[in-house]
Image: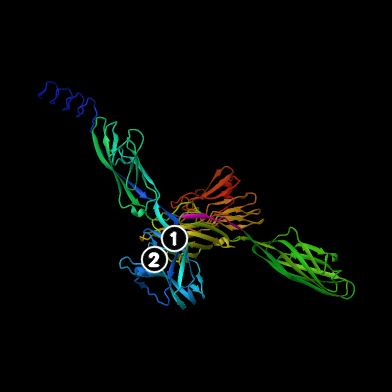
Amino acid sequence: DSDSDSDSDSDSDSDSDSDSDSDSDSDSDSDSDSDSDSVNAVDDNVTLDVETEEVSINNGPSSQSGATLATVGLGNVLNLSVAELDAQSTFTVEEGTSRTLTIQASSLGVSLLSTYNLNIYKLNPDDGTYTRVDSVPNWLQVGLVAGSSGQLTLTLPEGEYAFLLNVANGVSVLTGFTLNVLQDTTHGFVTTGNSAAGNVIDGDGDGTGGDTAPAGTLVSDVDGTAVNESGNTEITGQYGTLTIDALGNYTYTLNAGLDASSITGNETFTYELTTPNGSTSSATLTIDLQPAGLLAVDDSVDLATSASVVQEAENFANIATASWTTVLGTNSATGTGGFTVEADSVLHNISLGFAVTGVALTGTNITWAILDSGGTSVRTGSVASGAIIGGVATVNVAGLDLTAGNYTLRVTGSSSVLGLTTVRGSVNGTETHVEEFHTGASATVTGNILDGSGADGVADNLISVGTKISISNANDTDSAALDPYNRNATSATVDGLYGTLTINADGSYSYVRDANIDLSTMTQKEVFDYTLTATDGSTSNASLTIDLNMQITGSAYADTVNSTANDDTFTLGAGGDTVVYNLLDNADATGGNGTDTWTDFSLAQDDQIDISDLLIGLNGAGGTIGNFVSVEFDGENTIVSIDRDGQGTNFESTQLITLEGVNVSLEELLQHLNTDG
């Protein structure tokens, strides 16, 4: 070769490889192996959201003394000297906290039937003046020697406050007072102690921060602390603790209980890598501490609701009258009267009542008949004179059910007793409205939208005390605004579609569902939309859904019931019953209806499912019925699904109803499916 050494390669060293070092391997370092011992540590960065939780500290009861301000009128802004403040009740609320007080004043001073106003002033740090932020007129009433106020609960934001009493009316002479603090709670937000993990050598998942290092390289030092070759080493940072091992695996845990406002920057650690031959390289691991933003989380709470077919007592009183006068032998008379069974109704548990007046309270015989609108008898009978007691007789017409229509009661009375006799006939029964279903008595559910209690337990992420809540019903026809710092706005009611929500500024709520709701009106879910507003002005939206999952019970007749926007369970009894699915939401895969269950669907009773309002393009662009309806078996149950537009692309097959305890093929189901109205 042409170089100056004695070997045959082209480099200037005396070995036979092609690199310029003096060993015999092909890399550029001076050891005898074939790898490179160079090391290069690269900075790592990981983001950790600073999660917080609300904490409350019970400060316990206390009391303070103050001097009332005779007849002095107080303005909205005061200049109070130190001496004047020393004579008054004062409170301090620390930065980043709020303080809820329940207070009551008492007085033993000399006063002549005087009444005092409570005035609450807050310090303006910029100029040292005090501005009135609240007042309670006529709060303390004092008799000749003593008096006390009612209890007052209020929440104060951070700041310094003075509580002053001045005379509203009457005469006061050197009257002092005692302000008793019955309850005193400080609220604040602190960190929860969440963590982030990774590996400083490997970097994150996409390779960012990955170090270049030969096999056997270890983390040897972090911020001047030697890292153990086995096990973990803990490094205390400004806001948390870094736990790391020699292989680079780490977990950073933020200290729990920190005031979130005290975290003013990131947490950075410098680590050093050492290779097997002693080469080193350093880089940083930065924990990017990001304050978690305000986040409202949807809540959904179950309120089981029962509903049943509407039944009501009917009394068609004295509709048929027969009156006659007996002179010789036996005489009689016949009277008739009509009654109507309403459309979509059945009259059952029928009884007839007969009232006899006149001289023949005994010895009168009665025959009767119920005729349909065509004059055909549907039931006949008689009442012997011995069954008329005190002029009254009742006949139970067992097994007779009258469907909708017009009917006639015919009554014939006869007797041989001389004189005038009158028989009046009445029809009584229970009318079942087979297409009308109502809920039962009202019911209540409670929870808290802020901490998720009563629902699925997912809390909203709050970032400060004093969070405001605005809330409205689904149709924006009623709303409320809640402010924990405004004692007149700490609780409100909002009328929903099917009940009333009472909600407090701390997020707790009580929902009372109305009684006797017509199921046909339940075309939407009961949803309340709310917005949280933090003290920094940031907002977040979520909703509270009251799931009125219905348990619907039918009659022994052919009922027709509408599915609702909730998840309904139907137990409809005997008769050829029908569940109707109306189009409640055109954009929804089930038309806005819930996912339902039918516990006693029967082919033999000719039960029906009406989905005609939901299907789009049947026997047209959407294809035939097989493109719209499908069934699958789940054990002994049949799951019925629909694709509203069949071969169209706007919807896909979605579960609609489960038929419990029966396997129904698609061919069988189609005989019990109304698809065309």
- Residue 508 horizontal/vertical position (percent): 49, 59
**Which residue is label 1 attached to?**
530
> Residue 360 lies in magenta, yes or no?
no
Q: What is the span of residues highlighted in magenta in the rendered image?
A: 298-307
Q: Is residue 96 left or right of residue 369?
A: left
Does residue 26 appear to the left or right of 338 in the view shown?
left
In this view of the protein, can residue 549 be seen by the observer? yes
Q: Say if residue 40 shows up in the picture.
A: no
The single residue placed furthest to the bottom in the displayed view is 170
Q: Nearer the viewer, residue 623 or 115?
A: 115
Q: Measuring 55% from the left and 43% from the top, which residue is drawn there?
A: 634
- For badge 1, the amino acid type reads Tyr
Task: Say which quadrant the C terminus sits in.
Answer: bottom right
Q: Residue at x 36, y 53 (%)?
A: 260
The residue that disc 2 covers is 161
Say what secondary structure mark 1 lies in: strand
Q: Nearer the viewer, residue 556 or 609?
A: 556
Q: Look at label 2 and name its amino acid.
A: Tyr
Q: Main secondary structure of the magenta part?
A: strand
Residue 537, image quadrant? bottom left
- In the foreground, 611 or 123: 123
Name the one closer to the observer, 146 or 5: 146
Residue 496, percent from left and from top: 51, 63
Q: Alpha-carbon distance for marks 1 and 2?
A: 32 Å
For marks 1 and 2, the one nearer the N-term is 2
Q: Tell me if residue 147 comes above or below residue 275 in the rendering.
A: below
Q: Residues within 10 Å of mark 1 (few under 14, many from 20)?
A: many
Q: Left or right: where does residue 30 sit relative to residue 265? A: left
Quadrant assignment for the N terminus: top left
Q: Position of residue 409 (x, y in %)?
A: 75, 67
